Image (cartoon, helix red, strand yellow):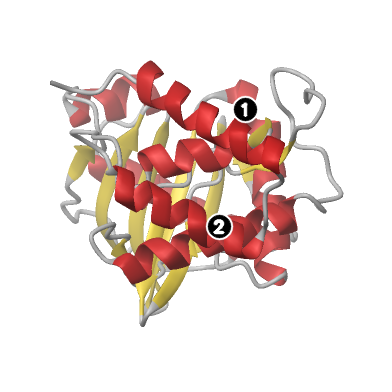
Amino acid sequence: MNETEGLTTPTSMLWESTDPDTALTERFGFASEADATDWLSGVLAAQWGLKVTACEQLVISDANCLAWITVDGCRMVAKWSMRERVFARLAAIARLTVWLGERGIPVSMPQAARDGRSQVEVDGFSLGLQRVVDGELLDIADPVQVRRAGEMLARMHVAMADYPEQIPTDEPPAPGAQLVGNDFRSANILWAQGKVAAVLDLEETTYRRRVDDVAQAAVLLGTRYHDWRPTPADVREAFVEAYVSVVPLGPDEADALEESIETHLRSILWPG
């Protein structure tokens, strides 16, 4: 018997209003939280050689399920997807995450399986495993956090411009585009001990002009999971100033950035 067998694991939806138990069964084929936890324990034992001793919670986000677990006294997050068409992309992004971590970008690096893979396909799912990074979600009310976030995005752009592997996308990169994270905001940025502790969730990574990525980040920096609101103008300005202090923009780029910010402000359907 697994140590997790029979334990009650709460399941919730990250942002949808769908019943989580129904989603767990209909999307992932698990009869119950215990069934999902037992499956995960078996996969981690077989593929990673790890023993799960506790599962705190399951969280469902669209086609993904996340489990906060304890393995040998260490808190970790396992995340698996049931959308087969993105499996190759997920594996590529896992390799990108490792590459960024090796170059000093604070990311939650995947834990390699026994065979060295960062992302494993098993039982019709694509699954990755990461250590939990301690920290709080970025608070845009703190000017220091805003500045460090702007500097961090600039560092990421510099690093990602040199990434040697092609990330699968629906369309080929347009002229002037480079690899960017495409989802840099409070929900995906952890702050601890006076610095950005981790940039999470690179699954939206794509190729676009970096000024467009800066503009999107500036407009959405404070957003988390619900009740999105545009970042206040003074915070946007401080964020962009911090970015430019690391990666200066030419006059044409600066104009393109301002235009892109206005486009994002107009195009996003804000609640209320």
Q: Residue furthest left?
A: 272
- Observer able to see residue 117: no
Amino acid at the residue labelled 1: Val
| Residue at 20% across, 30% down | 21
For label 1, the crowd category at 10 Å Cα-Cα, with few meaning under 14, some 14 to 19 and many 20 or more, is some
Please tell me the numbered disc located at residue 86.
1
Left or right side of 187 for 264: right
* N-terminal label among 2 and 1: 1
Please, what secondary structure does the residue beneath circle 2 have? helix
| Vertical position of residue 4 compared to residue 40: above or below | below
Q: How many marks?
A: 2
- Observer able to see residue 101: yes
Mark 2 and mark 1: span between their CA atoms? 31 Å
Q: Nearer the viewer, mark 2 or mark 1?
A: 2
For label 2, the crowd category at 10 Å Cα-Cα, with few meaning under 14, some 14 to 19 and many 20 or more, is many
Quadrant for residue 178, please give it.
Answer: top right
Please, what secondary structure does the residue beneath circle 1 have? helix
Q: Quadrant of the C terminus?
A: top left
Q: Quadrant of the N terminus?
A: bottom left
Amino acid at the residue labelled 2: Tyr
Left or right side of 11 for 123: right
| Vertical position of residue 139 compared to residue 22: above or below | below
| Residue at 82% across, 38% down | 166
Residue sitting nearer the eye, 28 or 156: 156
Query: Quick check: marks 2 and 1 in contact, CB under 8 Å?
Result: no
Residue sitting nearer the eye, 220 or 206: 220
Residue 227 rendering spot, x and y as whole percentages: 18, 33
| Residue at 24% across, 36% down | 32
Quadrant for residue 77, please give it.
Answer: bottom left
Residue receiving disc 2: 243
